[in-house]
Image (spheres, rainbow, N blue to C red):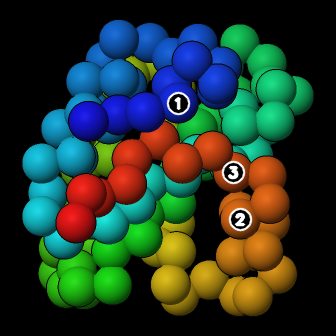
Amino acid sequence: MLQNIDRISPLPQEVICFLTSLTTNNVIDRMIVFGSRAIGDYEKYSDLDLAIDAPKMSKLEWQKLKEYVTYDLRTVLRISLVYYSTNPPKLKERIKTTGTIIYGRQS
């Protein structure tokens, strides 16, 4: 279930539906919105920066997700996906300090 959606910028319904669909993926542990939409410094069509924390996701699954978002997802907003665990320490720190967790797997 999504959480903290009210803390980030208003999102189109199709983006919320997409994010909700990701919560059913058993290998995704967390989803974190970061960047301008998380800190409130966004414009109407600013992209959505989304960090996916999924240490058990295979490279093939990640590639398919990226391709879907890039080529098949129909939304007015561009979604920029990043694979959290492979990011440089500085970007991870920025995501931690300015990001908003919108999904966390319940143990």
Marks 1 and 2 sit apart, C-alpha to C-alpha, by: 15 Å
- At 50% from the left and 84% from the top, the residue drawn is 85
Q: Quadrant of the N terminus?
A: top left
Image spot of residue 16 (x, y percent): 35, 23
- Asked whether the beta carbons under mark 2 and mark 3 sit within 8 Å of each other, the answer is yes
Q: Is residue 29 above or below residue 56?
A: above
Marks 1 and 3 sit apart, C-alpha to C-alpha, by: 11 Å
- At 28% from the left and 58% from the top, the residue drawn is 105
- At 71% from the left and 37% from the top, the residue drawn is 38
Q: Is residue 90 above or below residue 20?
A: below
Type of the residue with mark 2: Lys
Q: Which mark is residue 4?
A: 1
Query: How many numbered callouts?
Result: 3
Image spot of residue 54 (x, y percent): 33, 74
Image spot of residue 95 (x, y percent): 71, 62
Tell which of 67 and 32 is nearer to you: 32
Q: Quadrant of residue 39?
A: top right
Other-residue count near label 1 (Cα within 10 Å), few / some / many at <14 / 14–19 / ≥20: few
Is any part of residue 80 visible from this angle?
no
- What residue is pinned by disc 3? 99
- At 78% from the left and 74% from the top, the residue drawn is 93
Mark 1 or mark 2, earlier in chain:
1
Other-residue count near label 3 (Cα within 10 Å), few / some / many at <14 / 14–19 / ≥20: many
Q: Is residue 55 left or right of residue 77?
A: left
- What residue is pinned by disc 2? 96
Badge 1 marks a residue whose secondary structure is loop
Q: Is residue 106 left or right of residue 12?
A: left
